[in-house]
Amino acid sequence: MSNGTDTTPAVDLSKAEAAVDLPEMGDESRYDALMQVIRNRVTVRRFKPDYVVPDRHYDLILEAARHGPSGANAQPWQFVVVREADTKKQISDYFVAEQRFRAKAKMKFPTPNYQGLATAPGFVVVCSDMRWTNAFPVLNDGSDLDRMYHENAERILLQSVAAATMSAHLAAASLGYTVWWVTAIGQEEAQAAMRPLLGIPEEISVLDIMLFGPPDARPYKRWRRPMEEIKHMDQYDRSQCPSDEQMAAWIKERRHKVMYKDANKVD
Ligand SMILES: Cc1cc2nc3c(=O)[nH]c(=O)nc-3n(C[C@H](O)[C@H](O)[C@H](O)COP(=O)(O)O)c2cc1C
């Protein structure tokens, strides 16, 4: 991973725009390379503060996002790269305050420490324009049915942006970075706090923040459900559908462990 001043050339974004290059059917060599990146994408919440992300890396990462799939190919995403330390700090202050509020409100959610936002070397604010929901199947006649379609459309939009964001996270991981996905959608106050700092117009919503950089401490892999718990062949295996009590117990007893612990330490 390079550091310091960016001397590398910009990414050629026009390259192979129209070409699709599929491997031989069943050839797993690219799969293995992809899985190496997927398995090693890990969240950290504190990065090495002095590392400077070369501008080229932002291009490489957002180029991956640009190729994400989206409902109606609307590509309803915009990305604001934040490089100014003061802006990062102000955004971080908002999330730290929100974290304190949640702790006081006794939500019992094991809220992480958001102070690491302030010194995250890679900082990308992921935005969308909710008016894109009209690009998906909606009636726009004010009926109950229309409300249902609008809810569906909003989900299509959010899934589309998440798909592009995931590509960006994987691209960052492929460059050797650890990553952090922070949610902002649904928090009106987060929107209000960030818009003026970044010159974001009212029409645009901040959905997430993508942070990345070299980790401050050795990262670890978090627990993953085994395949047999998630895979169903032909028919849904009802033994994998927890009762309400089992669900509540899981959230109470396991959630904080699987969120924060090394997979090897989750009993
Ligand atoms: C949609 C989504 C929203 C997330 N929101 C937050 C968040 O607001 N704050 C946070 O600290 N982590 C957030 N995360 C990170 C998850 O906590 C993390 O991915 C998960 O614990 C698994 O760890 P891993 O990424 O190392 O595999 C989010 C991840 C996703 C995919």
Image: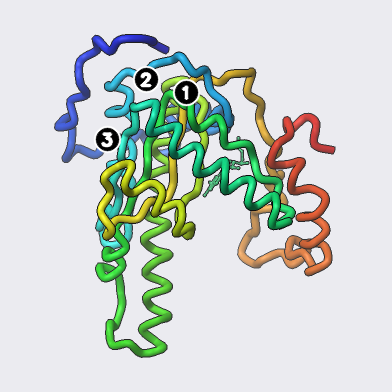
Q: Mark 1 points at which residue?
A: 213
Which residue: 73% across, 56% down?
106
Q: Locate residue 20, reporting x and y percent.
A: 24, 39
Q: Locate residue 52, reporting x and y percent.
A: 38, 16
Instruction: Please tell me whether mark 1 sits on a helix, a strand or a loop.
Output: strand
Q: Answer yes or no: do the residues labelled 1 and 2 have beta carbons within 8 Å?
A: yes
Q: Which of marks 2 and 3 is in front?
A: 2
Q: Distance between the residues labelled 1 and 2?
A: 8 Å
Circle 2 Cα neighbour tier, 10 Å, few/some/many (<14 / 14–19 / ≥20): many
Q: Name the residue under label 2.
A: 53
Q: 96 and 254: which one is in front?
A: 96
Q: Answer yes or no: do the residues labelled 2 and 3 have beta carbons within 8 Å?
A: no
Would residue 147 appear left or right of 214 to someone viewing this image? left
The residue carrying mark 3 has its beta carbon less than 8 Å from ligand 1: no
Q: Name the residue under label 3.
A: 21
Q: Locate residue 115, reporting x and y percent.
A: 56, 32
Of the two numbered discs 3 and 1 on the same chain, state the one appearing first in sequence.
3
Of the two numbered discs 2 and 3 on the same chain, state the one appearing first in sequence.
3
Of the two numbered discs 1 and 2 on the same chain, state the one appearing first in sequence.
2
Q: Against 68, is 248 above or below?
A: below
Would residue 60 appear left or right of 30 to someone viewing this image? left
Three-letter amino acid code of the residue under disc 3: Asp
Could one spot residue 213 in this view of the protein?
yes
Q: Against 116, is 224 above or below?
A: below
Q: Locate residue 185, reporting x and y percent.
A: 45, 55
Instruction: Please tell me whether mark 3 sits on a helix, a strand or a loop.
Output: loop
Could one spot residue 33 in this view of the protein?
no
